[in-house]
Image: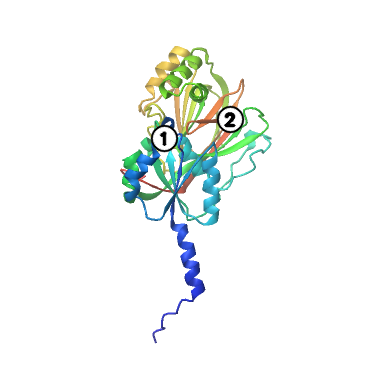
Amino acid sequence: MVTPPQKENSKSIRNRRDNSKFNDLIFILNPNSQGGNTGKNWDETYSKIKKYLPINHQIIFTKKANDGTLMTRKLLKEGYKNIAAVGGDGTINEVANGFFHNRSSRNNSVTNFRDFKPTAKLKPVNPDGVLHIIPSGSRNVLAASLRLQYEGIDSFMHINEMKKSKIDIIGVTTADKDDPTLTHNRLVLNAAEIGVGAEIINRSKKVRTKVKSRLMSTVAGIISTVPTYESNSCEIILDNDKTISPSLTMGIIANGQFLGGGFNAAPKASMSDGLMDLIILKDSGSIKMLEELVSLKGDNSYTEEDNILYYQISQLTILPKERDMTVSLDGEPVGILPASFKIYHNALSVKANTQDSL
């Protein structure tokens, strides 16, 4: 006996129609990316790309730091599923953070980082949420690590060709730079930097508030940091079962292969292998430091004799023994050591114009 189809009542039809808006693609766009050119040229850009976008789409501009996270979290709670991040690595990081509930309070008192154990699982705001990646920054380092085919306008024009996949993300807890008894929780897509690399980023961003040129601000950051930078004795706990105590000049905790400047610092890294790559540059004065920074160009045969250590791990804690060290996440300074890091395997669904499967 064949059951006749059920007639849909007017209430269910109305609910289905109302819920259809949640299939809209929401673009969260940072107008300050590309040195402000994204916002300045947006009307012209939109006129070129509109025909390539889904009929049902919305565009929201961020106004200040952390807007991307708060907007994304609100939209996902309301039922929207498809969120596109348009901007540089910092903007994409903010939006990605909005896909998950905060793992704990922003102002969570530090007790003992040695015993700190990150949350076993991340809690997504909307399990059906998908992050669409539109790289539109000055450097787009994440795009290099993901091996994206297109950036900026080209990425919009090929939006219907985006492939869906899952990628790992790194959960990070750092101490607050002004009050080391407080912690901050953040997620990283591409890489965290500690020490001289993070300090160069920190000083460059301060210069950029007065000098808009990224090149000039980066050079100023290098000149003001490298000549006087001192390594810091640290205790590093790997996967809770191995401890090393290097004199750390720079640390990189990588999910992707690349850093700013085209450095292929983590040549073994994959963004879906369930591991993060730890690279430690140790015992380096200013001249030696510059030599070894240049050597971070993809040589996967790092040896201790070269003062570069390389590990693949799922969790680590870094405890400083001498002085504060800046921690930068996806190109944004966020805190200082001590810090803990944990990989979350295939935790984020993304759509992007990738050349290969991730």
**Which colour assignment does the render follow?**
rainbow
Q: Residue at x 37, y 55 (%)?
A: 55
The image quadrant where one finds the C terminus is: top left
Q: Residue at x 43, y 38 (%)?
A: 87
**Residue extending furthest bottom?**
1
Numbered disc in front, either 2 or 1? 1
Per the image, label 2 sits on a secondary structure element best described as: strand
In the image, residue 246 above or below residue 275: above
Distance between the alpha carbons at the discs numbered 2 and 1: 31 Å
With 26 as the anchor, is 51 left or right in this view?
A: left
Q: Quadrant of residue 327?
A: top right
Q: Earlier in the sequence, mark 2 or mark 1?
A: 1
Per the image, label 1 sits on a secondary structure element best described as: helix
Query: In the rendered image, which residue does mark 2 sit on?
Result: 335
In the image, residue 190 above or below residue 53: above
Q: Observer-nearest residue: 117 or 134?
A: 134
Q: Observer-nearest residue: 80 or 179?
A: 80
Q: How many marks?
A: 2
Q: Position of residue 224 (x, y in %)?
A: 50, 15
Badge 1: how crowded within 10 Å, few (<14), some, or many (20+)? some
Q: Quadrant of residue 146?
A: top left
In the image, residue 340 above or below residue 195: below
Q: Position of residue 239 (x, y in %)?
A: 53, 37
The image quadrant where one finds the N terminus is: bottom left
Q: Observer-nearest residue: 190 or 30?
A: 30
Query: In the rendered image, which residue does mark 1 sit on?
Result: 40
Badge 2: how crowded within 10 Å, few (<14), some, or many (20+)? many
Is mark 2 in CB contact (under 8 Å) with mark 1?
no
Q: Position of residue 84 (x, y in %)?
A: 43, 46
Amino acid type, mark 1: Lys
Using the rendered image of the protein, determine whether residue 196 is visible from the camera's viewpoint. no
Amino acid type, mark 2: Gly
